[in-house]
Amino acid sequence: MSIERELSKRSGGKCELCGAEENLKVYQVLPTKKGGIDEAILACNTCIDQIENPDNVDLNHWRCLNDSMWNENIPVQVVAWRMLSRMRAAGWPQELLDMMYLEEDILEWAKATGEGEDDENKLVHRDSNGVVLQHGDSVVLIKDLKVKGSSMVAKQGTAVRNIRLDHENAEYIEGKVDGQQIVIITQYVKKI
């Protein structure tokens, strides 16, 4: 059975966040370890757009989290916690966050993308043009890079998909180039 069918069965054919019944698709909750139904939700285009684009957040749309934060499925809880954390300055999301309880390992997963951290403590990864990079983005190398510890040279113009952010240094990201996982300095990439 495909992941989409399993999620549709699990959710009753509705967005697991807002309950919408149209334009549904699988949304992988990053960072993933194994993939699959235990790290994904079924969500509508509206929810996915607002998750991926913080500038598009409509506070009233997310009042649905009052119900979905109690969902028994962990990936739904993680996304609910992240969105509530992002909007906590509005007041009511903070009240919901205060009621929400996540096991320690689940909370660690929820915080893995940097949501919930104070803005002054939050690491922001930016590409060579100053565009904010997020976990799972795709970038292109803007110059040839010699890979330390190997004879490999990552060529200018190489696309690196599904990047991971270094949570200790805002200038480092990780990604696969020619099948090899490497660390890349953000000043040498441009978001696609």
Image (tube, rainbow, N blue to C red):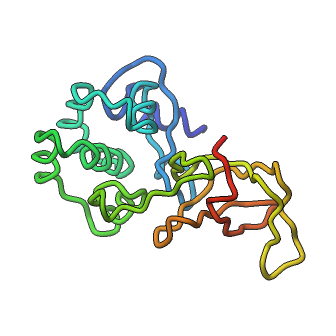
Horizontal and vertical percent for residue 5? 53, 32
Q: Is residue 5 above or below residue 127?
A: above
Which residue is farthest front? Answer: 129
Horizontal and vertical percent for residue 36? 55, 49
The answer to whether residue 179 is left or right of residue 77 is right
Q: Is residue 47 above or below residue 79?
A: above
The structure residue drawn at horizontal position 84% and vertical position 79%, both measured from the top left corner, is: 150
Residue 145, quarter of picture: bottom right
Residue 11 appears in view:
no
The answer to whether residue 57 is left or right of residue 155 is left
The structure residue drawn at horizontal position 87% and vertical position 67%, both measured from the top left corner, is: 153
Q: How many marks?
A: 0
The residue nearer to you, when weighing 12 against 76, is 76
Which residue is farthest top? Answer: 22
Q: Is residue 159 above or below residue 173?
A: above
The residue nearer to you, when weighing 7 against 134, is 134
Residue 19, quarter of picture: top left
Residue 42, quarter of picture: top left
Quadrant assignment for the N terminus: top right
The answer to whether residue 49 is left or right of residue 121 is right
The structure residue drawn at horizontal position 38% and vertical position 38%, both measured from the top left corner, is: 54
The residue nearer to you, when weighing 88 against 73, is 88
Which residue is farthest right? Answer: 151
Q: Is residue 191 above or below residue 153?
A: above
Horizontal and vertical percent for residue 127? 59, 52
Residue 46 appears in view:
yes
Horizontal and vertical percent for residue 163? 62, 55
The structure residue drawn at horizontal position 67% and vertical position 65%, both measured from the top left corner, is: 184
Quadrant assignment for the C terminus: top right
